[in-house]
Amino acid sequence: MIPRGIASPSLLSWAFTHKFEDHLPYYRQEKQFERIGVEVSRQDMSNWQQHVYQKLSPLFELLKQTVKSGPVVQMDETSVQVMSGIKNNKDIKKDEAAKLDIHKGWMWLARGGPPKKKVVWYEYHESRAGKHAKEFLEGYSGYLQTDGFDGYDYAVKDNPNIIHVGCFAHSRRKFFEASKASKVSKSAEEGIKYIRKLYETEDAMRAKNLPEEDFLKQRKEATLPILEQFKAWLIKRKEEVPPSTLMGTAVHYSLNQWEKMTAYLGSCHLTPDNNACENAIRPFVIGRKNWLLCGSPKGAESSCGIYSLIETAKQNGYVPAHSLKALFEKAPYASSLEDWEKLLPWNIFSK
């Protein structure tokens, strides 16, 4: 992967999985190497990351295309602190310049692809503007499942090819927050019970392993009565609870998102929530607590690439360290589109 360098496929896999799966920053790995008498600096590892990211650009393009080739795309986003480089201003002290240099960026995540070829795609942008989701979804046709962030509404606006689906887990979360307030705890818990019934029904239907048409029909028959009761309860509570309270927020969120939250009944590939996507972005959120920020926008972009490789490997049942090692062994010899397609996670170990 890196000509005339010491970075073997095993060493690259080791460094990347330690940082992006085990959340161990490069400066800590540098200390580990020092303890065994090996000289590998954090800058070396950062440079390797950038080199590998650039080398694998054809593979990343294939992964991005695969995300949008399935029936459902799930999306989420989270913030990240990024450094842009010390500002050249003599009137500003270095420590102050360093603080001014850090800005808030956003990691966007999409999870999708065919049922047996799931891809987790990370993408860095400097803002949370809905235009980024819109640009990513260009050319996509199918279901988009998200939380209630209005940036996604903008992304699918005037696009008849995308059906926007909501998330009951976010509704439940708001009722759970309201349940902590003692005065409305019983009422909030009643809302949680309705949502629990939806999940119990979903689990029971999927346990039957029905053909697609039968599953859709039976799930709808079993779920609609629960939804009707829940909506009637929400409408009643809306008239009784001030919208500024936690309970009012939960009720209004559920009613405002109702059409989108219930749209999951239209496809066997959809569940009541966006949890699979949130689970895929969680490793980044955990890692962020350790390494705190990205050293540059380019570093954030290359981090997206490595996170995409690791999380996609996990989605397809592979050990990331093994998957990365095999990829780094074969990628230097890839010269055609067909070669790169063989390096996709579900192809790389096939005989």
Image (tube, grey):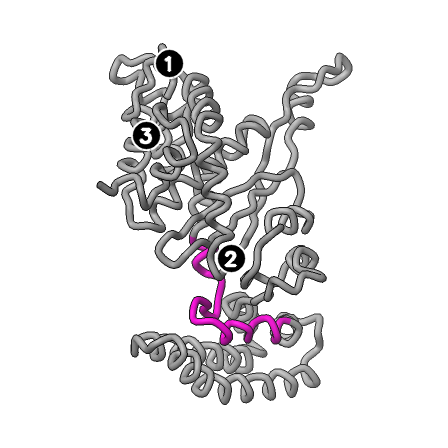
Dot 1 amino acid type: Pro
- Which residue in the protein does label 3 denote? 13
Q: Residue at x 55, y 73 (%)?
A: 263
Q: Residue at x 46, y 57 (%)?
A: 70
x and y percentages locating residue 125 in the rendered image: 62, 39
Q: Give whichever of discs 2 and 3 has the lower sequence position.
A: 3
x and y percentages locating residue 184 in the rendered image: 58, 78
Q: Give whichever of discs 1 and 3 has the lower sequence position.
A: 1
- Which residue in the protein does label 2 denote? 74
Q: CA distance from mark 1 to mark 3?
A: 16 Å
Label ID, residue 3: 1
Q: What span is colored magenta in the figure?
A: 257-279
Between circles 1 and 3, the one closer to the viewer is: 1
In the rendered picture of this protein, how many numbered marks are placed on residues? 3
- Main structural element of the magenta stretch: helix, strand or loop? helix
Dot 2 amino acid type: Gln
Dot 3 amino acid type: Ser
Quadrant assignment, res 95? top right
